[in-house]
Image: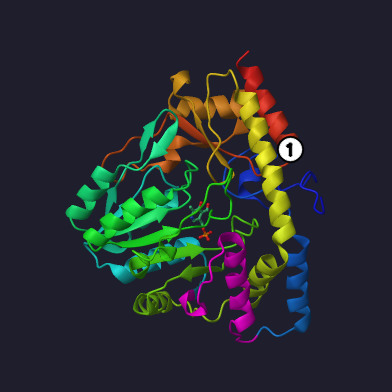
Amino acid sequence: MKYNFDEAFDRRPLSGKWACAIGNDLIPLSVADMDFPLMPEVGEAIKKAVDMRDFGYQSMKEHHYQAVLDWIKKRTGEDIPREYLLNTPGVLYTMRCAMYAVTNPGDKVVIQTPLHTPSIKSASMMGRIPMKNWLIYKDGKYTMDFDHLEKCFREGAKVLMMCAPNNPTGRVWTKEEMDTVADLANKYNVYIIADEIHRDILWDGHKHISPTSMPSIKDRSISVISTSKTFNMGGFHIGTAIIPNAELLAKVRDMLYNFGYACGMPTVLDREAQTAAYTQGETWYQEMMSYVEGNISLALDYLDGLPIHAQKPDGTFLLWVDISELGINNEQMWDLMRNTWKVTGDPGSYYDTKDYQDYKGLEHHIRINLATQRALVEEAFDRIRKSFK
Ligand SMILES: Cc1ncc(COP(=O)(O)O)c(C=O)c1O
């Protein structure tokens, strides 16, 4: 290995989730970032940019866009035309602006729950009406409820905001599932806006299918990607929207601009960091993937025979753990995690919200983040295992 993912890296001084471990020995396996330090090549690129001392107005040059295109080509084999790309200030912000660009206040917006909390909230912003399309949970696996999705579309939804791969369930939507979504979206003239922030983290041959790569729906699709999850760079604010339809791209660009973001002019440091990650990050990425996959296997081994259960995710570094057999509510779960396990994940209730219709609360799951040092995974799951003895 070129990089040492076992390196003990103290995140307590700066990380919000690690602050809770100051003064006690809690292991926080929450919040979807990694406990690995910044890839050195990205740090070097930032230092180089600082040394050039030019922090005046600067734009994205062609080689900055080419870095994004080359990365996509390496991961999916797709040759995306440069004109499809729009530089953005990050995923969540762009998902919301894209949604504003294709809807008006009072329009209905579909989200698929369980879902990462801020993405749930996106559906109700600026007077839009959220519709929850709950995923179906059966035999430990999540699938889409297409009958209900069609009902939402029939009732006038203008847009489906997908999370692909889905955070927290780890589902990577298959070609068949994406074809059905595309057929329904075409039938009812619905736009698809896909949050693809986790799309590089795939296991066991699962393939990510972006709606922007599907001839049947690409003209009604927008997808949003970034280096945040792939390279643990959530502390930067840069990403890319892929929008094959030029008119749609112009609308999204105008909407970002309306909120004050000039798409061709990211901050110098964000731009150089993203470019270094995409152009020099292949080995780091490959090694990180095999390390994290080892963590997932280890965690699943520890869970074997316990009254809490999980399956390997199709994608993401997140384990969605079924705790229903414990028969406890969220408050009791918090107590168990903090005071007995001394290992915290994110409680299921984070992935639903009381604010909208059809509240399920999700007290039957917790989400555990496995992008951390192997020794911490061992220690955390050993504690969990011992608590059931
Ligand atoms: C599905 C999903 N979308 C968006 C984000 C946040 O993206 P950004 O920081 O680029 O806005 C996260 C972070 O956890 C996420 O899991």
Query: So how many labels did they put on this image?
Result: 1
Rendered position, 120 above or below 365 = below
In the image: residue 297, left or right of residue 139: right
* Residue 114, horizontal then vertical, whole percent: 40, 42
Label 1 within 8 A of ligand 1 by Cβ: no
Looking at the rendering, which quadrant does residue 211 occupy?
bottom left
Rendered position, 249 above or below 372 = below
Q: Residue furthest top?
A: 389
Q: Note whether residue 123 is visible.
A: no
Q: Amino acid at mark 1?
A: Arg
- Given residues 365 and 82, the one toward you in this image is 82
* Residue 203, horizontal then vertical, whole percent: 58, 44
At a point 58% along the width and 55% down the height, the residue shown is 200
- Given residues 267 and 313, the one toward you in this image is 313
Rendered position, 83 above or below 305 = below
In the image: residue 13, left or right of residue 258: right
Q: Residue furthest left?
A: 155
At a point 28% along the width and 58% down the height, the residue shown is 185
Q: Which residue is mark 1?
A: 374
Could you say whether the residue bearing mark 1 is in a helix, strand or loop?
A: helix
What are the residue bounds of the magenta stretch?
56-85
Looking at the rendering, which quadrant does residue 342 occupy?
top right
In the image: residue 336, left or right of residue 117: right
